[in-house]
Image (cartoon, grey):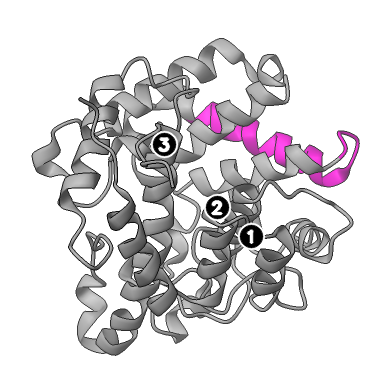
Amino acid sequence: MMQKLNKNDFNEVRQWIYRNARHIELTLWQYEFENGSQEAVLNALSFYQNEDGGFGNTLEPDSWNPDSTPYTTSIAISMLKMIDFTDIKHPIVSGILRFLDSGAYFTENGWLWSIPTNNDYPHAPWWNYESDDATTEFGLSAELACFIFSVCKKDSALYKKASTVVQNIINRLRQSIECDAVGGNVSGICMLVETLEKLDLLDTFDAAFLLEAAKKMVANAIVTDSSKWIQYGGYPHEYVQDPDSVYYSDYKDAVQQELDYLIKTRPSQAVWGITWTWFDNMEKYEKAFTISENWWRSFHAIWKIRFLKSFDRLETM
């Protein structure tokens, strides 16, 4: 019989969220599970936006840089996607487009993964800025391009910029799919395929190659051995978020196993922990990490409950 998260367990998660989450995560919880409003999420999100239109100010809990960064801006975009909001006239959306069109932290290879001022504030070691590898994580640029394709007109300069970025990513994948099948690159390519398919743009960028590349990258990155899920990354839900996913049929057993795993491993009276620390930066930023860890637990709890809900693994509320 299929396991489901029961009402009592759901309410324990809800209680933890209300006691520990930031306002932005609380509004996302309310939107997802309590008929909350887009307006409440947008209002909470607006406090993280800077005058240049980009986002900083620790919206990304592992980077306490107040300056706008492409990655932290992508976190804001993911929250807009969660509430299905794309109104280009709204100051949050128009501000993001202005930031992405400004040329800030942009090269011909895409938007920078990390920026120099990250080093000035508490941060995880992967946010250390080193100029040599600032654009190696092309998944970020793929995700930003997806947002641009979804809201901009095809004849706009920013749309054309995004198209060039995507073509450069494809050219890079033609050289080495396996070497680039890591971390955010895989989720970024999965999102790119999903977005291009939704917008009927796949054929514009060599559909056959992109679909095959995405499948190979997922196969290299996904972890189907549940004994390894206490480690960071590769969980099935990172690539298969609902039954409509193009990857679900290939990894159905692993997805169902992870759903069971989440129900079994949630701590009593709490939410799931995270599987990383700030490693080499812990000694310097231990207090900041302790705060960020709680913020991450809130955000990931929402994603995990959404995942369970998408596969009908919640008892009727």
Q: Amino acid at mark 2?
A: Glu
**Image position of 71 with respect to 143: above or below:** below
Q: Residue 124 occupies which quadrant of the picture? A: bottom left
Relative to 151, is 72 on the left or the right? left
Q: Specify the principal SS of the magenta part.
A: helix
Asked whether the viewer can see residue 109, the reply is no
Q: Amino acid at mark 3?
A: Val
Nearest to the eye among marks 2 and 3: give it.
2
| x then y, percent, for residue 242 | 45, 31
Q: Which residues are magenta?
A: 153-172
Mark drawn on residue 186: 3
Q: How many marks?
A: 3
- Give the labeled residue for mark 1: 36
Q: Relative to 212, say whether 3 is above or below.
A: below
Image quarter in which the N terminus is found:
top left
Query: In the rendering, which numbered label is found on residue 32?
Result: 2
Quarter holding residue 236: top left
Q: Going 20% across and 86% down the picture, which residue do you hit?
A: 283
